[in-house]
Image (spheres, grey):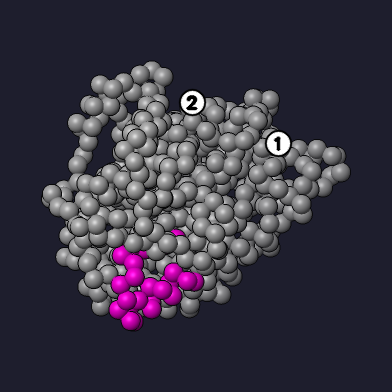
Amino acid sequence: MRKTISALSFLLSLLMVFLIFSGCGQAGSDGHETEGRSDGSQSSTETEKELDTRIQPSLPERTFNDEEIHCLHWTLGEGGPGENGWIPWEEIAIDTMTGDVVGDAVYERNHYVEEKYKVLITTEYAVSNTELPNKVKLAYNTGDDDFDFIVQRSNDISSLWTNEYFYNLRGDDTPYLDLEKPWWNQDSLKAFTFGNVTQFASSELLVLDKSETGVVFFSTVLRDNLGLDNFYDLVTDGQWTWEALIRNAEICENDLDGDLIMTAADQYGTCGNRTVGSFMFVGAGRKFADINSTGHFFTEVGSEDSIDLMAEIHETVIYESFHALSDRIEDFRLTNKFMDNQIGFLFYSVKLANTLRNMETNYGILPIPKYDEYQPRYYDLISAHGDSLLAIPVSNRTPEITSFVLEAMTAESYYTVYPAFFDVVMMGRCTREPESRDMLEIIFKSRTYDVGLIHGLGGYTAEYEQYAQLHYGDVGFTSLYWKYQDIIDKAVTRINELIDEWN
């Protein structure tokens, strides 16, 4: 049960939020910004103007007699957000304001929706990555109406979306979801629409889908000391490419202890975990699988071009003396090495910035580089290992009400929670250079999903991410594909037969 707050504490809460957001630009996922002073803050007149020009949700005047809207949310362990569940921020419900900017924005968003529409928004966390799917399946089989919507990481939806566990978010059962509004992530809708059925989606309601966006962090100390390029100019000019990355990273590589062996004691050009190969592959404009114009699932991972690209990634970027793979080098502490300015470029998801806020020196943030300057845009992969997607289970007996409340929450998040994450957490506490604002806008406009990585292609993508990057020079990508070809073909055929049934 949500605690009742006094009128005085509520006024103090509003004052706190006003002070927080008075220093923030209002940048949405489509890059729109409200006008502000030169220091980035907004006057009261400008705030009123922003409120007047807001895009409003297309919702009628309704109240719901304190109906509870309950969310079942993923974690990977007991303890929930901030402990051992892999979740750095609350994104659905929080009991009280704590001073954490994102959490407080979530609290205020919910308070606004709860008061206006007379609902109660609550959440519970699964204690493992298997509990949530099991609860969804149990509710489907028994008809229990224990939760109204779920938030699941995309890495764990493959066992769910191929069944009839969820409503079609485009269907008549969820009439208030306006998926054309700017607060719905259009790339997620494209990636998770099979035929005419969309069971999962990402929106500005969520935070973790933004925090799991793949990026490149770089050491400004090494940039300045070694006379490296102006990376911000390269990005805006469309020249931030593999060649630019390699050219600058090679200058950073240094056998610091002079033992002629690259170990945890040395300085590396690039570094990352097992997802670097996927970041680079998708960043080059490719997909492990995609949805075609008829809404069917297809993959071209066995094409000559795809196999050549995978090999090129591992031959030119991810090789042992140049790239430090944290899983391979003994006593290697990826974050500590970067914070000590002994890594030129670090591939990771955006959430690492929350850890780097304690870094004593400056750092910068860039999109994943393009393959070459002829590639028309950047692509920043949303990692399936820690993001969030929402869905409404068919065990929910009032999906119309849930769709109403989700649309209201998402629309409000577009102007509150997302700016709190972007402007305050990313700009005010983490990244240190003003040009990073421009980079983050490019990055968040470039976010993309790869349904092949999410589906797994019968285990092929998992082996690419793990085996391939742990074996460096002895990887044969043609052999790797032939090992899985029959499994991949059967998986694609099975999915498309299901899509035809849905249609």
Which amino acid, by three-letter code, is at mark 2?
A: Pro
Question: Looking at the rendering, in which quadrant would you find the C terminus?
Answer: bottom left
- Name the residue that disc number 2 marks: 434
Which of the labelled discs sits on residue 40, or is there none?
none
The vertical placement of 208 against 418, above or below, is: below
Q: Find residue 190 and report its horizontal and vertical position in percent.
A: 31, 57
Q: Find residue 243 and report its horizontal and vertical position in percent.
A: 56, 39
SS label for mark 1: loop
The quadrant holding residue 55 is: top left
The vertical placement of 131 against 321, above or below, is: below
Q: Which residue is drawn at 37% across and 51% down?
A: 3
In this rendered view, identify the residue nearer to me: 343 or 261.
Answer: 343
- Name the residue that disc number 1 marks: 340
The vertical placement of 15 against 269, above or below, is: above
Q: Find residue 91 and report its horizontal and vertical position in percent.
A: 41, 50
Which residue is most to the left? 60
The quadrant holding residue 418 is: top left
Q: Find residue 252 and report its horizontal and vertical position in percent.
A: 69, 35
**Label 1: how many residues lie within 10 Å, few (<14), some (14-19) or many (20+)?**
some
Q: Can residue 412 be seen in this view?
A: yes
User: Which contiguous range is marked in magenta?
Assistant: 130-154
Which residue is most to the bottom? 141
Q: Which residue is drawn at 17% across and 53% down?
A: 63
Magenta highlight on residue 34: no
SS label for mark 2: loop
